[in-house]
Amino acid sequence: MYQYDNYDQTLVNERAAQFRGQTERFLKGELSEDQFRPLRLMNGLYIQKHAPMLRIAVPYGLLSSRQLRMLAHIARTYDKGYGHFTTRQNIQFNWPKLEEVPDVLSNLASVQMHAIQTSGNCIRNVTSDHLAGVSGDELEDPRPYCEIIRQWSTLHPEFSFLPRKFKIAVNGAVKDRAATQVHDIGLQLVENDQGEIGFEVLVGGGLGRTPIIGVTIRPFLEKKHLLSYLEAILRVYNRFGRRDNKFKARIKILVKELGKEKFTEMVEAEWTAIKDDLLLDPEEIERIKAFFQPPPYETLIDDSLLAEKTAQDSHFAAWFRHNTLPHKTPGYRVVVLSLKAPGKPPGDLSESQMDAVADLADHYSFGEIRVTHTQNLVLADVRQADLHELWQRLKSLELATPNIGTATDIICCPGLDFCSLANATSIPIANGIQQIFDNLDYLYDLGDIRINVSGCMNGCGHHTVGHIGILGVDKKGEEWYQITLGGSSGKDASLGDRLGPSVAKDQVSHAVEAIFQTYRELRLEDEAFLETVRRVGIQPFQERVYGDH
Amino acid sequence: MEIIKDGHIVANDWRHLGDDEIMPEQAITVSLLRWKSEKDRLLACGVPLGLRLNSEDKLEEVVGDLKYFSIIVLDFRHFTDGRGFSLTRLLRDRYRYGGELRARGDFIRDQMFFLSRVGVNAFEPNNSASLHEMLPALQEFTVKYQAASDIKEPLYRRRT
């Protein structure tokens, strides 16, 4: 992974010192609430229901064991002993004290971490594919480009006071595991007719209040033009994006109002003026790529004992089937740690679990951990021969729930329990759905289902791209929930269709169960949930959910 | 009244003239509106001229006239409106404006480093601010990843 040199380290140190000064000025009354707000947000600090919430950047989801131990230390020292991983591969702490946040940032800086631009109207932490570098379907590892973009966007002097937040995702695989179509800018590595690799540039996707799928404004961009093209898009947005209404301020609205053609024309005109002045040198790409070379794998063959071990132990077999993935290197396997144990807030990890996972990463996976946008963790480089032992250790940590990709692997925002923006709780909804499954056979029979829960229309739980999306709304002080069907953030991205009127809190699990039953009755052989919804439409589901009441 | 210019606290030599004020015999800045409607009269006055822009103004309307101005003032009405950061960058880098570029009004100390990187070399904050306390903000960071108006090469060409 990328290692800071003196420049990178100096910058995060200076940033921590700057924020210490800003906090002191605020506490002394020299900065007003209004003036402090964008400054603290640009350092990931929200004022929440109970306490400030601090969001820490995990660049493109990659953590070292040393960094994870520091997060454990922060959870213990400054929080109530746990952290929450987010859908943008970051981590949030819900209980730090404002006056202690500068100390947290100094601690983070000591392990090459920061909270820069994890919130606010600026370019946010760049996200990517959690299987980057290890999946077989990859054209090129996207992480070097993420790091290049991270550096370019960090404290960008021109683009730190944008109309609204700005999110960039980069994907290098055939399968889109970075949700590039629902980002302000999505970059997909592609190969052109000459066999050169470059970027397809998508703009204007996004979730939240007005969910929109992004549009391609340039099918192929040479790598050397990456930064100038981003700069051109950002300049057009910074100058012409709406600032009169915060709900219409995202770039997706600008693209929609101007139309794709006009918007593209403006970007291309701006780009033409700057493209020769801001070239990304091949030497720099190579320098950054060197940090993302494969770890020193052993020369192995696929483990011949695996079949035997899975045959002997059905629990291990279930975990192997659901929580591990193929690795492009023979003899290795990708392991997903489920942060979706039934009854636990999805995406939460305790400080002792963090320390333990750091140890496991050191022992089994070259000391690296990845955060997925589905709020789980990944040990990407595990020897197949170690899987059984690792599984046992994960089981004792409650991190081996064999449910990855299933209906209980729910994406969920913190909701009304923690968040001051929320209209309704989300964690109890997720836990309620998990309770439907008293046995795993039923869960596995349903196959791949993505259920996403958000406590308000800001959509941190990505409900609009859930196969089943659940959105909390406030109805005269009561929590109600709208259900959508058929969303996806994959290659075939789509936004879910609303099933019908919102349902009461105590009816959500019942409605979801009715959806499951309808699927079981209507599916064709081997047809996945999303495929059935797309084939039959939402009507049969509507009839079952609302007919029952 | 004093301002910060080129890293020092200096006297303000410019009078910011309202659109309905009578022209005095001294260096003045005028709004884009007034410039457009009274360009010939203003040029005939023979006093040093400056232009005031706000973030809503269409920069492209005035790029042919930049040679007349010894100063361009960017008026901040609200510090969160970041359009000015692009306008000053364009003035410096695209339209090669070489005179004083001044941020004025509702910007805050914590934006001065960014502003200095996009071409601004003078700062005239709202009355309440202390220039002495603001001055160190220009030096808060020694590391600059990006090429901008102040440094033409990105850090990746400067790393040693």
Image: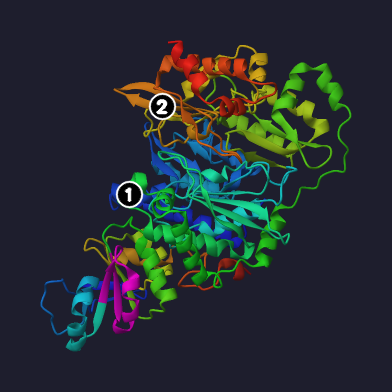
Q: Is residue B60 magenta?
A: yes
Q: Chain of mark 2?
A: A
Q: Chain of mark 1?
A: A
Percent x, y of residue B158: 59, 71
Q: From the image, tell me which residue sits under label 1.
A: A26
Q: CA distance from mark 1 to mark 2?
A: 34 Å
- Residue at image x 57%, y 42%? A179
- Residue at image x 47%, y 36%? A460
Q: From the image, tell me which residue sits under label 2.
A: A472
**Which amino acid type corresponds to the residue marked 1 in the rendered image?**
Phe
Q: Residues within 10 Å of mark 2 (few under 14, many from 20)?
A: many
Percent x, y of residue A50: 38, 31
Query: Of the residues under marks 1 and 2, which one precedes in the sequence?
Result: 1
Q: Nearer the viewer, residue A30 or A86?
A: A86
Q: Is any atom of residue A462 visible in this view?
A: no
Range of residues picked out in magenta: B51-75
Left or right placement of residue A249 versus residue A319 in this view = left
**Which amino acid type corresponds to the residue marked 2 in the rendered image?**
Gly
Q: Is residue A139 above or below residue A362?
A: below
Q: Is any atom of residue B75 visible in this view?
A: yes
